[in-house]
Amino acid sequence: MTHMKELFISVSDSGNHNIPSSTDKNKKKKLFYILLASFLIVGAIIGIVAGVASRKNNSDAVAHHPVLKSSCSVTRYPELCYSAIANAPGATDNLETSKDVIEKSLNLTIFAVQHNYFTIKKLMKRKGLTKREKCALHDCLEMVDETLDELRETEKDIEEYPKKGSLSKAAEDLKILLSAAMTNQDTCIDGFSHEEADKNIRKALLAGQVHVQQMCSNALAMIKNLTDTDMATERRLNGERKLMETDEINITTSYGIIFPSWLSVGDRKLLQSSSVTPNVIVAADGSGNYKTVSAAVAAAPAKSSTRYIIRIKAGIYRENVDIPKTKTNIMFLGDGRSSTIITGSRNVVDGSTTFNSATVAAVGAGFLAKDITFQNTAGPSKHQAVALRVGSDLSAFYQCDMLAYQDTLYVHSLRQFYVKCLVAGTVDFIFGNAASVFQDCDIHARKPNSGQKNMFTAQGRDDPNQNTGIVIQKCRIGATSDLLPVQSSFPTYLGRPWKEYSRTVVMQSTLSNVVNSAGWFPWSGTFALNTLYYAEYANTGAGASTSGRVTWKGFHVIGATEAAQFTVGKFISGSSWLGATGFPFSTGL
């Protein structure tokens, strides 16, 4: 401040001259600008100091806030949990319970997703983008849209918690929504993993996507802690007995298979009935209401709360079909899996992303399909080429075929059920991060390209709190006719870990000798071998022996009690929704 005082004196003295010379005028002007600059610098310093002090005071208040401290302590990224709230206006206002902290965290996560949207839009204006980069950026926009819906639904559900429905159902609903939101961030980034040129865009997006994923992870951890605590308290108050609300109802059909309960009685009848009256008919020969499946989907009502049935008559439909999130409760009904075929050939080699390569993509909630083949004919040399991608919650498939090579069936997110289906492919041909159960299905490896290995699964769980995984129960795991005579040349494994907490369970299934004695294969070095969860239970057949299986920390041969946690009733809350489909299913072992 001594220098500032000298400046004031200097200006005062210069004012004593009656007739200032041009030199004096220049000196005054110079001194004026020096003074002004000094004021601005000091002001800025004061502002910065005040801001830092304010944030420090706020951070100190947050750090010592018992509810916030307790809530954040259970997360995987506690410092982010603290700082995100500390830097928000009114950080500790009305934080009285862990539920308040969750709501605040969700609100901040939504804001971060919206920020990522503008980053993506800005990147889309860059010149010289490749075909795949443009495609991947569009995928990212779709993921933003899906994430916002899932976070807003989580906000609504946590606001109503625990007043609406059973605690166990509320817990599973909340966890699956946040698991899907996290998966969306991975999907966006994965679209820029195919070529060196993609990495520049990936780098520009990475920080924002990782931030949102970690925010979602924190919210998920807090929700799991909250709901686990509440359910434990409820069990204790009920004398440690099993609550009636969490008991699964076994709904056995004439086929001897029991459906998950989330399929209503009406939908179960639809799936098993030989005579169903459709809302519209698709026929390639012009004898129906529409000639293409896409046209019928486009004309379907938006956000329907009742089942809308699209019958697809026998024929080969060469098109890519999207069932967007606004088209809910749609059912595709074919004339038989060998008669009604939807086929495409998009693939990564020709410029698509894995996500966008799907011949059929089902996103609208409550999607059902029966007696249809979903196919991608790109072939093994075209690498990732998806026949069917599913991000539809509470979706089910009955007597359907999914045929391709690498990445045949993308079980992307949310809850899914497959019964009496055929899935055939080569590398990672059932992959994704849904909570998906396969019952009474045929899962067959095909002949891949020379030098390739077959992987039945590549599950994408990347957080230990996600309630996702692939469960294969009462299925037949084998080889197609083209692989059988040469299977010794192509090692074939039950799966490998796509993400760090990959989870796959194979139980009560028949495994042919196509399955390598090691059972499972690493992704890269020791990645995920200690954190994955791979399990086998009560399998039979030439490939079922576990004596030569991998010795990873994450591999388990389990008993009935542990296996029961991965049944339709437990793992995908099947008793609450599958009954509506009319498809056969089994909730237990």
Image (cartoon, grey):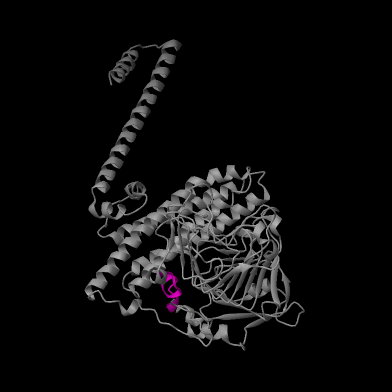
Can residue 345 be seen in this snapshot? Answer: yes
Left or right? Give the position of 548 relative to 132. left
The percent position of residue 368, horizontal first and vertical second, equals: 56, 76
Residue situated furthest right in the rendering: 285
Q: Residue at x 39, y 68 (%)?
A: 562
Q: Is residue 531 above or below residue 562?
A: above
Nearest the viewer among 410 and 302 is: 410
Nearest the viewer among 188 and 225 is: 225
Residue 411 sits in quarter = bottom right
The percent position of residue 327, horizontal first and vertical second, equals: 57, 72
The percent position of residue 451, horizontal first and vertical second, equals: 67, 52
Nearest the viewer among 145 and 414 is: 414
Left or right? Give the position of 227 relative to 126. left
Which residues, given as a range, are shown in magenta? 565-576
The percent position of residue 318, horizontal first and vertical second, equals: 73, 69
- Secondary structure predominantly adopted by residues drawn in magenta: helix
Whether 571 is among the magenta residues is: yes
Q: Residue at x 60, y 81 (%)?
A: 309
Q: Which quarter of the rendering shows the C terminus?
A: bottom left
Nearest the viewer among 543 and 288 is: 543
Q: Residue at x 43, y 82 (%)?
A: 250
Q: Which quarter of the rendering shows the N terminus?
A: top left
Left or right? Give the position of 174 relative to 284. left
Can residue 263 be seen in this snapshot? Answer: no
Q: Residue at x 37, y 29 (%)?
A: 40
Whether 573 is among the magenta residues is: yes
